[in-house]
Image (spheres, rainbow, N blue to C red):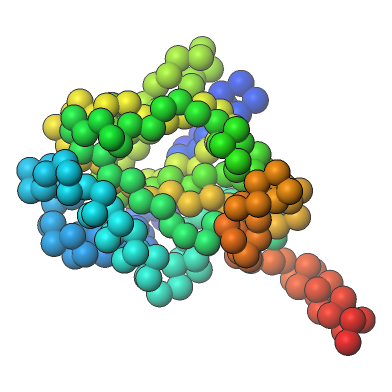
């Protein structure tokens, strides 16, 4: 069963929160990170590790989740059909999952307000943001609301957020008593303009790779391939 929240529009920008009940891949992500770091309750991570250890732990967990078998296929199963309604049937995906860990009071994890396009990302993409712990108040992602207030997105484990990174977002110091762990990855339409001339590190094969194609697009590629033989 799937619960779909009503879309929330921030001016001309959008964000959507979707819920997947008992989703196996979200569980797999959580268990993978927990086992990799040998921490059963990730929300209590700050009680078990020192702040100076966090970068090493993040890198270890990053490598672990990106070795999950067929994770791109599992991401697609998680986000469709909604992602097809937003971006179409022909999709490219970021080559690696990203991992964020934000412990209470740990200021090095603060990500200042920003717009992804201004840091070299495609303006045509959407971000898939998956909390592995409950994300709330100051430990969550922040975005501008329709009154230009910078507010947290309260989102629970088992839900995921799809948002347009062309609106300002980031985070602040975590003043809650819980660590937040989250995964994010970027998806865009395969046929959206390629801006690799502006940001070479964001081109296909370096940053993005194929995720899925419609039957008609697959057929068209087959025809072109035969023509070039």
Q: x, y percentage for residue 159?
A: 37, 46
* Residue 221 screen position, x and y as percent: 81, 73
Lateral position of residue 73 relative to residue 179, left or right: right
Picture layout, residue 212 above or below residue 108: below
Residue at (79% x, 69% y) in the render = 216
Percent position (x, y) of residue 20? 39, 53
Q: Is residue 106 visible?
A: yes
At 11% from the left and 48% from the top, the residue drawn is: 49
Identity of the residue furthest to the bottom in this view = 229
Eyeballing the image, is 61 above or below 175? below
Side of 193 relative to 175 (left or right): right
Which of the two residues, 126 or 112, is positioned nearer the viewer here? 112
Location of residue 201 with respect to 161 vertically, above or below: below
Image coordinates of residue 226 in percent, x first then y, are: 87, 84
Say whether residue 154 is visible.
no
Name the image quarter holding the N terminus.
bottom left
Residue at image location 50% in from the left, 29% down from the top = 114
Which quadrant would residue 178 be assigned to in this image?
Answer: top left
Residue positioned 88% across, 87% down in the render: 229
Residue 27 shown left or right of residue 118 in the figure: left
Q: Residue furthest right?
A: 227
Camera-side residue: 108 or 176?
Answer: 108
**Extreme residue in the left direction:** 47
Horizontally, is 127 left or right of 138 in the view?
right
Q: Nearer the viewer, residue 218 or 35?
A: 35
Front position in the image: 98 or 25:
98
Report the number of discs: 0
């Amino acid at each position: 069963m799937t619960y779909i929240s009503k879309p929330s529009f921030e001016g001309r920008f959008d964000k959507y929160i979707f819920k997947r009940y008992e989703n196996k891949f979200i569980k797999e992500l959580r268990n993978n990170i927990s086992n990799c770091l040998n921490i059963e309750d990730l929300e209590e991570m700050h009680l078990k590790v020192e702040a100076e250890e966090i970068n090493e732990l993040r890198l270890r967990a990053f490598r672990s989740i990106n070795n999950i078998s067929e994770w791109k296929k599992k991401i697609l199963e998680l986000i469709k059909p909604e992602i097809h309604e937003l971006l179409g049937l022909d999709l490219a995906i970021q080559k690696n999952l990203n991992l964020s860990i934000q412990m209470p009071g740990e200021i090095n994890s603060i990500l200042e307000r920003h717009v992804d396009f201004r840091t070299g990302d495609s303006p045509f993409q959407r971000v898939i943001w998956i909390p592995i712990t409950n994300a709330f108040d100051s430990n969550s992602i922040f975005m501008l609301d329709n009154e230009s207030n910078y507010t947290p997105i309260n989102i629970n484990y088992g839900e995921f957020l799809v948002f347009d990174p062309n609106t300002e977002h980031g985070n602040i110091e975590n003043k809650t008593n819980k660590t937040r762990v989250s995964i994010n990855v970027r998806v865009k339409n395969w046929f959206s303009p390629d801006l690799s001339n502006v940001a070479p590190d964001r081109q296909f094969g370096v940053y993005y790779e194929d995720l899925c194609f419609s039957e008609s697009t697959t057929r068209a590629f087959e025809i072109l391939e035969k023509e070039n033989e």
